[in-house]
Amino acid sequence: MPSALILLGFDVGHAVASLLNFRPSVLLAAVAVIDGSVDPRAAAAYSHLEQLAIMARAKCGRLDVDVLDVEKAVKTLRDALIGLAREGVPVIVDVGGGMRLLVLETLLAILSARKWLQDLLKVVAYVEGTTRYIELDYNRILRIVKTYRTQEEGGELTYVDRAVLEVLERRGTATLRQVHEELVKQGITTSKQNVSRILSKLEGKGYVRRVGRGLYAKTPP
């Protein structure tokens, strides 16, 4: 069973949805602290959520986050995620509530976390007023970011093209099978046939060169 970090504002609707949808065994509700105080409405929301968690047989705790100190807040949230993910437990991060500043700090905590932790996180965002939600794991977030960067820095190469080049740069040389296996490990769904086409295209553009039978390397700058 997963654990969950839920950003809590004044409404527990999204938190209840996460409790029902994901059945976390451990639940940590992050609430904003401003000038040393928690808004009474957020405190009341937590008390309500705590009772619901008890009924769902989930261990529940509150995480007070000083949102006006961004660096401290990010560290607090990142440390909390590390604690929730101990022993490789997947973590649901519900960003459906809480102050916008708290949401921003949570995303910064995720982006600044170590890779092993990022791989265990799943961000969940609810459509206001409904129980519908979208899920974003870290690989999808990274894919979105890298795709935009690729378009800005050189539209001729796709995200997967760049990922292939990164594999070759990291390994020095690699076969088609090794490149494909590395991409799969990164969460990139593609076929060996497609990787072969990409390698041929990159070779034609001068980004990649053959250094042996079935062996590829990135062309030096």
Image: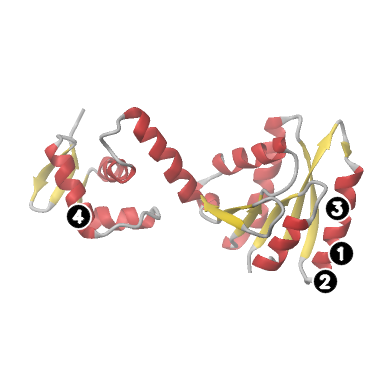
Q: Residue at x 75, y 61 (%)?
A: 16
Q: Disc 3 or 1, which lies upstream in sequence?
A: 3
Q: Disc 3 or 2, which lies upstream in sequence?
A: 3
Residue ID for mark 2: 55
Q: Position of residue 43 (x, y in %)?
A: 88, 48
What kind of residue is marked 2? Met
Are discs 1 and 2 less than 8 Å apart at CB? yes
What's the mark number on residue 45?
3
Are discs 3 and 4 less than 8 Å apart at CB? no
Q: Disc 2 or 4, which lies upstream in sequence?
A: 2
Mark 4, other Cα within 10 Å: few <14 / some 14–19 / many ≥20: some
Tell me how far mark 3 sits from mark 1, CA to CA.
Answer: 10 Å
Tell me how far mark 1 sits from mark 2, CA to CA.
Answer: 6 Å
For this orientation, the residue located farthest to the front is 129
Are discs 1 and 4 less than 8 Å apart at CB? no
Depth check: 152 or 108 in front? 152
Task: Tell me the mark number nearer the camera, choosing from 1 and 4.
Answer: 1
Which SS class for mark 4?
helix
Q: Residue at x 83, y 47 (%)?
A: 10
Residue ID for mark 4: 176
Task: Tell me the mark number nearer the camera, choosing from 2 and 4.
Answer: 2
Instruction: Quarter of the image for the C terminus: give it.
Output: top left
Tell me how far mark 1 sits from mark 4, CA to CA.
Answer: 55 Å
Tell me how far mark 3 sits from mark 2, CA to CA.
Answer: 16 Å
Task: Tell me the mark number nearer the camera, choosing from 3 and 2.
Answer: 3
Task: Tell me the mark number nearer the camera, choosing from 3 and 4.
Answer: 3
Mark 3, other Cα within 10 Å: few <14 / some 14–19 / many ≥20: many
What's the mark number on residue 51?
1
